[in-house]
Amino acid sequence: TYVVTEVCIKCKYTDCVEVCPVDCFYEGENMLVIHPDECIDCGVCEPECPVEAIKPDTEPNLDKWLEVNAKFSEEWPNLTTKKPAPEDADEMAKQQDKYEKYFS
Ligand code: SF4
Ligand code: F3S
């Protein structure tokens, strides 16, 4: 599966949802997640994200994000069409420790 990681928080560019052939992105207030049981590992979303928030689960140190994607994809609504990013998305893309501050 592929997972959405910290950089997405407060950026939410949503380019990723447009290309997913199985529509497996789910939207929280501040980030998107991928449903691990629905993702078919096609990889087309990875290069679409302008801030490289999407990673294959073969990369190291993704335990927290695997958990976040699995849990919240069951709770949040599906998102399949692109929507405007937050106005400060480009600024927020540079911030660190967004999970502690803004995750929702
Ligand atoms: Fe969708 Fe493919 Fe990305 Fe999985 S890897 S979330 S199936 S676009
Ligand atoms: Fe997030 Fe990147 Fe998609 S910022 S919403 S994973 S395009």
Image (cartoon, helix red, strand yellow):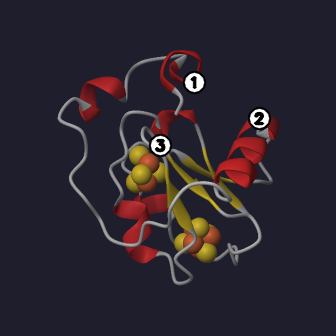
Q: Classify residue 95 by image quadrant.
A: top left
When the figure is inspected, residue 104 is found, relative to residue 79, above or below; the finding is above
- Measure the C-alpha gap from mark 1 to mark 3: 10 Å
Question: Image quadrant for the N terminus?
Answer: bottom right
| Other-residue count near label 2 (Cα within 10 Å), few / some / many at <14 / 14–19 / ≥20 | few
Residue 85 percent coordinates (x, y):
25, 46
- Measure the C-alpha gap from mark 2 to mark 3: 15 Å
Label 3 belongs to which residue?
Answer: 31
Which numbered disc, 1 or 3, marks the residue that appears first in the sequence? 3
Label 1 belongs to which residue?
Answer: 99
Residue 91 percent coordinates (x, y):
27, 24
Label 2 belongs to which residue?
Answer: 64
Which numbered disc, 2 or 1, marks the residue that appears first in the sequence? 2
Q: Decide: marks 2, 1 in contact (CB < 8 A)?
A: yes
Q: Give the SS element for disc 3.
A: loop
Mark 3 CB lies closer than 8 A to ligand 2: yes
When the figure is inspected, residue 18 is found, relative to residue 9, above or below; the finding is below
- Say which of 51 and 81 sits in front: 81
Amino acid type at mark 1: Tyr
| Other-residue count near label 1 (Cα within 10 Å), few / some / many at <14 / 14–19 / ≥20 | some
- Which residue is depicted at the point 80% across and 53% down? 58
Residue 97 visible in image: yes
Which numbered disc, 2 or 3, marks the residue that appears first in the sequence? 3
- Which residue is depicted at the point 77% across and 35% down? 64
